[in-house]
Amino acid sequence: MLRTRMKRLADRGELAVQRLADIETSILQLGDEDLLDLADIFNASADTPLGAIAVAEMTRRGIRL
């Protein structure tokens, strides 16, 4: 029973890591206008994970709101 639960929790963790990687990849593939829209939604703030990713990508591209 414990082994099954540990495996299930490990699988959930792996799935969460993969989802986060997919989200980051999706954000990196956005066009400039869509990236600016995303940053605007999150107020171009690094306070949230999505906002931080958007701000980092905007900085890399040299664009800002």
Image (cartoon, helix red, strand yellow):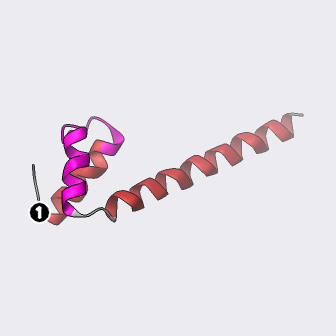
Given residues 58 and 10, the one toward you in this image is: 58
In this rendering, position of residue 9 left or right of residue 17 = right
Q: What residue is at 26 percent from the left and 51 percent from the top?
A: 54
Residue hosting label 1:
62
Residue beneath the point at 48% across and 51% down:
20
Q: Residues within 10 Å of mark 1 (few under 14, many from 20)?
A: few
Q: Residue furthest right?
A: 1
Q: Find out whether residue 49 is within the magenta segment.
A: yes
Q: Identify which residue, 22 or 4, lies in the foreground.
A: 22
- Residue closest to the eye, 50 or 7: 50
Percent position (x, y) of residue 18?
Answer: 55, 55
Percent across and percent down for residue 61 are 17, 65
Residue at disc 1, secondary structure: loop
Q: Is residue 1 left or right of residue 19?
A: right
Which residues make up the magenta segment? 32-50
Is residue 40 rendered to the left or right of residue 24? left
Q: Quadrant of residue 30?
A: bottom left
Please tell me which residue is depicted at 28% across the width and 45% down the height of the picture.
52
Q: Is residue 40 magenta?
A: yes
Q: Amino acid at mark 1?
A: Gly
Q: Position of residue 65 (x, y in %)?
A: 9, 49
Side of 52 relative to 6 (left or right): left
Q: What residue is drawn where x is 26% and y is 47%? A: 38
